[in-house]
Image (cartoon, helix red, strand yellow):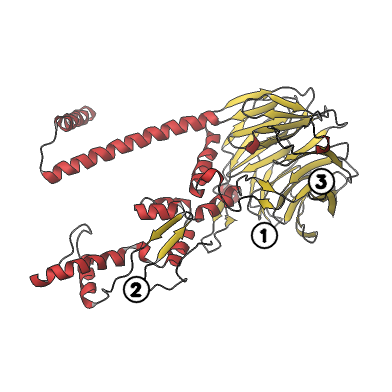
Amino acid sequence: MAFDCNKERGVSSPDNCSSICTEGTLIQANPLSHYWKAKGWKSHNKLGNQKSSNESVPRDSNPKQDDGTSGEATSSTCGVRCFTDLPAALVCEVLARLDAKDLGIVSCVSTVLHTLATYHQGWKKLYCERWGLPNLPATLNGPLVPGGPLDGKSWKTFFVEREFRSKSFMGKYNVDVLRGHNEDVRAVFLLASANLIFTGGRDSVVRMWNMEEGLLIDTSRPLGGTIRAIAADTRLLVTGGTNTYIQCWRYVEGNDHLFHISGNGTDQNSEFRLWGHEGPVTCLALDSLRIYSGSWDMTVRVWDRAHMECVQKLMHADWVWDLAPHGNTVASTAGRDAYVWDIRNSELISLISNAHVGNAYSLARTHLKDVLFTGGEDGAIRLFNVSDDEISKPVATWVPHSGPVHSLAYEYPWLVSASSDGRIALIDSRKLLTPKKPSKGSFSIKSVDASAVEPPRRMLHGFGCDLFSIAIGADRIVCAGEDGAVRVWNFSEALEIERRAQALRSLRQENRMRRRKAQAEMNATGRRPDQCSIAMKKNQLKGDKSVT
């Protein structure tokens, strides 16, 4: 991690102060004093031999030296024992090697360490390893605020909020049903950063919904075929289906809902099409520079967003069912196999043969480049490590469904699946993904016994129809299928319940600490306890008797 430190790495002079610079914070550390003498070490050794570190430092027997050496001994003890007296570069390296739990513990030690641990850039690394960069205002050349958090929040705040929100999927929820399609819905996409849901299906129209209110915002004209894939960001919306072309809408400036998909807006140039596939388009994905599309013509095409033209064509041995890009690679499933391609040179990096019994219909990737989830016609979900020597052997396998798994979606730590058996499975991946301790600090797939893999943490069922597409984001799960209804599972109520519970726990802890502090002050001054304390003790004694 890059930090602005005023001192050279690995060098600390006793005559100068080490400064520790973090994001928006400057902490001046205490210098190592000149007391590296026998007298200072003597004081330190005496301190270490005491029964309690809270006792005073023993002094030499000569009373004349007490006043002259007490200050020196005290500074010696503080200097040796103070972590922030280390060189700034070393402190930065130590904090960079801690995980989220350890950083939280360090921040509780003292006010100085609280400031250091709170604004340390390690929180950005931890956040991006799990969820990638937040949705910043961006252009094709990258974010407008490179590496900076949103709304002036620290990276620790972002991490804590996102981690807290991820726990809501085990809590209480409400189900909203969005009705508007008159035939089965084949594709859903959740753009949580813009509060939008996009859906499309056999009725050949794309519908745009408000995520919070569940209201229909806009509807496209009929596009002449079944919509099988949708992808979007805040700058571009793309759809594809059996009509073999990719329908695109550009962002319209000044539009609160980003896009005019009905074509009734003032900017008629915002809508266009990309031609090239010779079969139905089954899957789509976007990044800041490219559009990815897969088709039953057995190809994955990579399109340049700047010029809106195809720049690469990746050939497969069967129909392409799904794809997922990550950095300079794109993973895809075709037939029963899974592929990983390097888009810089169009080379095949990895091939997983016979990933499933039958077609591998669905695919999901995390922000960890080596992690690959697949769902198949056999009802199984498999986790592969694409960097492993035995790549064809799955690290973990779940069989939560009795029908084909048509769709997968991932948001750390939850993998969600939709199947033709009408059920949704939620799988927690935290125990399978573990951070490495070396300096890189990247995540890896944990080696586990297949019998030790935990079953899905939660199953949502009772729909009675085939489910074809699923999406997860914020505190929502969106799914749609054969009956034409779009269902939105809203877990925001679970978040509110947990917030109230946390506030109550904090209040109780604060009251306990206040009572302990007051009791300690009374014991120190020798005062008699007040009547409230006496009554409290009597109540405790009565409670103990009632228990016995």
Q: Name the residue under label 1.
A: 387
Three-letter amino acid code of the residue under disc 1: Ser
Is 446 left, or right, of 483 in this rendering?
left
Is 473 left, or right, of 336 in this rendering?
left
Q: Distance between the residues labelled 2 and 1?
A: 48 Å
- Residue at 73%, 30% in the rendered image: 208
Residue nearer the viewer, 397 or 492 = 492
> Is 89 situated above or below 266?
below
Looking at the picture, how far across and down is residue 371, in whole percent?
65, 52
Q: Name the residue under label 3.
A: 294
Quadrant of the rendered image containing residue 31: bottom left
Q: Residue 14: which numbered mark, if any?
A: 2
Which of the two labelled residues, at mark 3 and mark 2, occupies the earlier sequence position?
Answer: 2
> Is 360 situated above or below 369?
above
Dot 2: what SS? loop
Is 353 left, or right, of 72 in this rendering?
right
Residue nearer the viewer, 163 or 151 = 151
Looking at the picture, how far across and down is residue 457, in whole percent?
56, 38
Three-letter amino acid code of the residue under disc 2: Pro
Dot 3: what SS? strand
Q: Residue 456: which numbered mark, if any?
A: none
Q: Distance between the residues labelled 3 and 2?
A: 63 Å
